[in-house]
Image: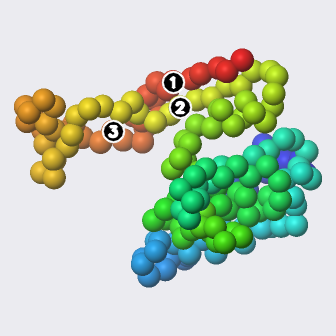
Amino acid sequence: MEFSHAQMLEVMDKGCVQALKGDYTLPIVSLLTGRKVGLTLGEYLEGLDIEDLGLPYFAISASLTHARMVVHREGSALRSVLASCRAPGMFPPLGWDGDVLVDGGLVNNNPADVMRECVGGGTVFASAVSPASSSRSVTSSGWISPGGVLRPARPIPSAAESASAPSATCSCG
């Protein structure tokens, strides 16, 4: 299963934009049903097991049932991908073998440690793109209280500003 750059962009457009249109549900558990994303990904992954892929692959999901990380290294490629991208609130959790799975970023947002276990030797590059956390707290009024001194919170940066922000990169080699 090889794709050209143009084919990969087409798949991403179809999966990330087109598959979300009209997939809304009454937001009791989630905003979207995830059905259309599942159908779109199924066009490429249905019937494939992780073991059948041409390159080593793993996916991370978080078990809400057992409060732990689940690493998918074998079995259904489709279900593994779906479990690993079930952002809580956006998509409903995925039921799998009596477990309730959501996006693995909740428990391990940068699984370089898991990649290290998977590849053994060699170099693993990982990039953490989340902003650094701070000890400042924002009150419900939108004012920041660092050390008891109140001042207005900074506005949330735009997507363009966020994209140009530096990221921390680590190499485990």
Residue 45 shown left or right of residue 111 in the figure = right
**Residue 9, image x and y in percent?**
71, 49
In terms of secondary structure, where does tag 1 sit?
A: strand
Residue that badge 2 annotates: 128
Residue beneath disc 3: 157
Mark found first going from the N terminus, 3 or 1: 3
Name the residue carrying label 1: 168
The alpha-carbon separation of the residues under discs 2 and 3 comes to: 18 Å
* Mark 3 residue element: loop
> Does 71 sit left or right of 76 as displayed?
left
Q: Amino acid at mark 1?
A: Ala
Between circles 2 and 3, the one closer to the viewer is: 2
Q: Is residue 165 left or right of residue 13?
A: left
CB of mark 3 within 8 Å of CB of mark 1? no
Whether pointer 1 and pointer 2 mark residues with C-beta atoms closer than 8 Å, the reply is yes
**In front here: 9 or 156?**
156
Amino acid at circle 2:
Ala
The circle on residue 54 is: none
Query: Which residue is located at x 46 percent, y 74 percent?
Result: 29
Q: Residues within 10 Å of mark 3 (few under 14, many from 20)?
A: few
Sequence-first tag of 2 and 3: 2
Q: Is residue 153 visible?
A: yes
Of marks 3 and 1, the one in the foreground: 1
x, y percentage for residue 39? 72, 72
